[in-house]
Image (cartoon, rainbow, N blue to C red):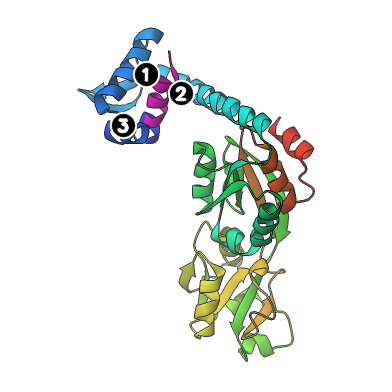
Amino acid sequence: MNFQQLRSVREAVRSGFNLTEVSAALHTSQPGVSRQIRELEDELGVEIFVRAGKRLTGLTPPGVQLLPIVERLLQDAENLKRAGRDFQSEETGQLSSAATHSQARYALPQVVKDFRDKFPKVSLHLHQGSPKQVAQMLISGEADIGVATEALADYAALVTLPCYRWTHSVVVPQGHPLQLQQQPITLAQLAQYPIITYESGYTGRSHIDNAFASENLHPDVVLSAMDADVIKTYVELGMGVGIVASVALDAERDRQLGILDAGHLFQINVTRLGVKRGAWLRGYAYSFIETFVPTLTKDVVLQALG
């Protein structure tokens, strides 16, 4: 048994059983991948994959049981490498983080700057994606740390920790009727206007939808986007009323817009930080986390990781 055999099994599952993609990912030939898998099956005495001729089409029942062990062995091997690098040098290396557009744009810039000032020899890679993509990047090992508001807590393979709580705000063009009224806005009033807000699965969109549904209201969402700046741009053009994360607003920068509190309309959101369960984090990764959320010290994170 060797790690190349284990990698062949893992990549076969990740690629949807496409051996051409597996061979490209592992920089080897397709016959070589097939041989590695078959040799491992022969050694274990069971077939891991269901086959149709020479094609892999799925996992056998034993394969389903063996896959988590394969994943764990490969993760432990990577943890050993990371531990060795950590003891060799605590201030050089690479850190990969994944975040949604809102987190990368509004929550992380100062954290990234402070981290770079403290660890100038660490190469920092910041990936962006949807909450589900952030989760998948953590699970696959592409990212060490993930930050998102939705989805992360839904994955058993991840350990997630709360970072901060936030609410939504409503943005309107200056002089809009909702801005001029004296009393707090209501959902019924919002539903009278075209709505511009986040795409489903982003930045608390589920809480927005649930709030309207709870009052049997059906707002006309004329435009949805991943980024608050895009939403604000189209609000400025008069296309509708925007619903955005309050953390994405700045009174000076957004002075061309009217900003209305909507904390009483929508459920409070919790941004979470995620790490793959069982992963080994370099020392500077804990520093990055604590820079982002001072209460998430190394001891707190290690306790959560168990």
Give the extent of the magenta segment.
1-11
Disc tally is 3
Disc 3: CA contacts within 10 A as few (<14), some (14-19) or many (>=20): some
How crowded pointer 1 is (Cα within 10 Å; few <14, some 14-19, many 20+) is rated as many
Q: Quadrant of residue 261?
A: bottom right
Q: Is residue 233 magenta?
A: no
The numbered disc on residue 172 is none
- Could you give the CA–CA distance between mark 3 and mark 1, rounded to whole angstroms? 18 Å
Frontmost residue, 201 versus 301: 301
Label 2 secondary element: helix
Q: CA distance from mark 1 to mark 2?
A: 9 Å
Report the residue at 76% width, 45% height from top: 296
Quick check: can you spot residue 147? yes
- The residue that label 2 is drawn on is 67
- On the picture, is 302 further left or further right than 148? right
Residue occupied by mark 1: 48
Mark found first going from the N terminus, 1 or 2: 1
Compared with 67, 258 (above or below) is below
- Residue 62 coordinates in the image, percent (x, y): 41, 17
The amino acid at mark 2 is Leu
Q: Is residue 174 above or below residue 17?
A: below
Q: Earlier in the sequence, mark 3 or mark 2?
A: 3
**Tag 1–tag 2 contact (CB < 8 Å):** yes
Q: Secondary structure at mark 3?
A: helix
Q: Is residue 123 left or right of residue 51?
A: right
Q: Which mark is residue 23?
A: 3
User: Residue at horizontal 56%, vertical 75%?
Assistant: 242
* Mark 2 Cα-neighbour bin, 10 Å: few <14, some 14–19, many ≥20: some
